[in-house]
Image (cartoon, rainbow, N blue to C red):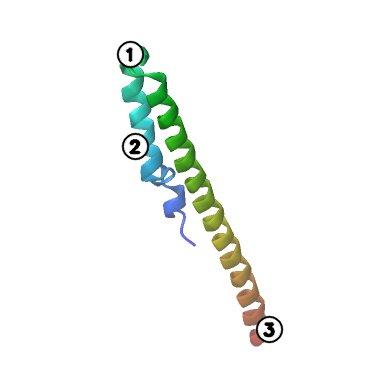
Amino acid sequence: STANTPEDDAPNRYSRTERTTYSRYSRDANSSGSSLPSNTLEKRIEELERELSKERQENARLIKMAQDKEELIGKLKEEIDLLNR
């Protein structure tokens, strides 16, 4: 394995969606919050909650895939060791 994997890169640590969401927050923080009706804010919160739920599901799926690959790597290493003996 290499020391500089994509997971270790700071720019890749957060998904594109999270980065754009963060920029949206900082942009919204500069505008006056009272200019948006609460109905619009509630819809935006619901939209963000749905997006967060999808991101969490995707994260769980990716973690499971990584665990499965690590397990497979372990099994293959054991098999290689047996073949070398």
42 up-or-down from 19: above or below: above
14 relative position to 32: left or right:
right
For the residues labelled 3 and 1, the Cα–Cα distance comes to: 67 Å
- Give the label on residue 66, or none: none
Quarter-wise, where is residue 74 in the image?
bottom right
Task: Measuring from the top left, give residue 22's x and y in whole percent.
Answer: 38, 32
65 relative position to 18: left or right:
right
Q: Give the amino acid at mark 1.
A: Ser
- Give the label on residue 32, or none: 1
Label 2 neighbour load within 10 Å: few <14, some 14-19, many 20+: few
9 up-or-down from 76: above or below: above
Residue linked to disc 2:
20
Q: Which is nearer the eye, 44 or 28? A: 44
Residue linked to disc 3:
82
Q: Note whether residue 4 is visible.
A: no
Q: Which is nearer the eye, 64 or 37? A: 37
Secondary structure of residue under mark 2:
helix
* Residue at 44% in and 44% down: 13
Contact flag, marks 2 and 3 (Cβ < 8 Å): no
Label 1 neighbour load within 10 Å: few <14, some 14-19, many 20+: few
Q: Which sits earlier in the primary sequence, circle 1 or circle 2?
A: 2
* Residue at 38% in and 35% down: 21
28 up-or-down from 7: above or below: above
Quarter-wise, where is residue 67 in the image?
bottom right
Q: Give the amino acid at mark 3.
A: Leu
Mark 3 or 1, closer to the camera: 1
Q: Which is nearer the eye, 82 or 16? A: 16
Task: Work out which residue is located at the far front of the displayed protein and give it.
Answer: 39
For the residues labelled 2 and 3, the Cα–Cα distance comes to: 49 Å
Q: Give the amino acid at mark 2.
A: Thr
* Residue at 64% in and 85% down: 84
Q: Which sits earlier in the primary sequence, circle 2 or circle 3?
A: 2
